[in-house]
Amino acid sequence: MDWLAALTQLRERNETAVIATLAHARGHSPRDAGAKMVISAHELWGSIGGGNFEASIVDRARKLIAAGGSAPELMTFALNDKVAGTHGVQCCGGEVTVFLEVINSRRTVVIFGMGHVGYEISHILARQPLNLILVDTRQEALTTERMEPLRGGPARLSIRHEIAPEVVLPTLPEGATVLVLTHDHTEDFVLCEAALRTTLFHIGLIGSRSKFARFRKNLAAEGHAEAEIDRITCPIGIPTIAGKDPASIAVGVVADLLARWENAGGEPQGEYLH
């Protein structure tokens, strides 16, 4: 498999990868400028020349993957017997510069409930490069005509009509974001209870503080500890957006999500009462 096919496969598997390109070669080098390889956490495809400098590139690429880095890097190596690298000496006699480009996996966001607010949130998120899964128990909420405006953006869209929507939760990748916005409080509760049994990045529940107080009591009765229940954010959004129409609520919810993602799990940026 060549590097391009490998990169396509990794994107389909939603795995982070690094493309290493031999950007410049001076003097003698094992490959010409333009040679590429793709590096994942556990696999390699292609080659930029082998030996010490390639092994060092692989080490650095995997550190970037593990750290969740996204900024590109340039690394220069002298290929002579006077310079010993981590993996030994390479005596070609030239010098090479390698460009490392991180291709991050896509975030996964699941919206349970395609009512007015869920639909408006979907419109915004469809313009982001992520995996967007839209789930509803009502077939009429997921008609082809209604979903068509959400297509065509960079988001990879999946539309699921599920009578028991909680079955979606165990299939999600670790670190996914879930928004619970259904038309039924009982359905909301079932989804929240199931979500607490997963390793999600964020669980957002639409509703008032009084609604969440009831949910908190009932979740505790189901055996969930207070620290677990605190993983749920309710209300959702940010307080500085006061509009109560669905579009305004959606802006606040997505703004909060973007801030959470950028802070990699830092403190919430605010709450909004809905």
Image (cartoon, rainbow, N blue to C red):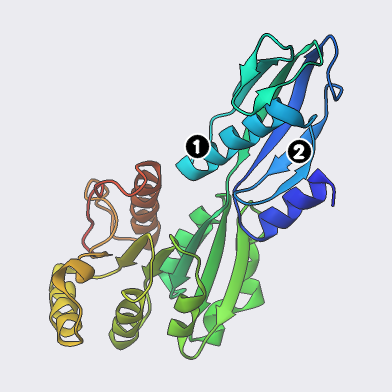
Indicate the quadrant where residue 248 lies. bottom left
Against 49, residue 205 (above or below) is below
Location of residue 266 in the rendering, given as x and y in whole percent from the top left corner: 28, 46
- Residue type at mark 1 is Gly
Against 94, residue 132 (above or below) is below
Q: Secondary structure at mark 2?
A: strand
**Circles 2, 1 touching at the beta carbon (< 8 Å):** no
Disc 2/disc 1 C-alpha distance (Å)? 18 Å
Q: Nearer the viewer, residue 50 or 125?
A: 50
Looking at this view, name the residue that lies furthest to the bottom. 163
Indicate the quadrant where residue 51 lies. top right
Q: Nearer the viewer, residue 54 or 118?
A: 54
Q: Nearer the viewer, residue 42 or 1?
A: 42
* Residue positioned 79% across, 11% down in the render: 94
- Residue type at mark 2 is Met
Location of residue 97 in the rendering, given as x and y in whole percent from the top left corner: 71, 18
Q: Secondary structure at mark 1?
A: loop
* Residue positioned 47% across, 67% down in the render: 110
Location of residue 104 in the rendering, given as x and y in whole percent from the top left corner: 58, 45
Location of residue 147 in the rendering, given as x and y in whole percent from the top left corner: 61, 69
Q: Is residue 100 left or right of residue 249?
A: right
Badge 1 is on which residue?
69
Q: Is residue 268 left or right of residue 160?
A: left
Front tag of 2 and 1: 2
The answer to whether residue 105 is seen in the rendering is yes
Against 73, residue 250 (above or below) is below
Badge 2 is on which residue?
37
* Residue positioned 19% across, 79% down in the render: 215
| 10 Å crowding of disc 2: few (<14), some (14-19), many (20+) | many
> What is the quadrant of the C terminus in the image?
bottom left
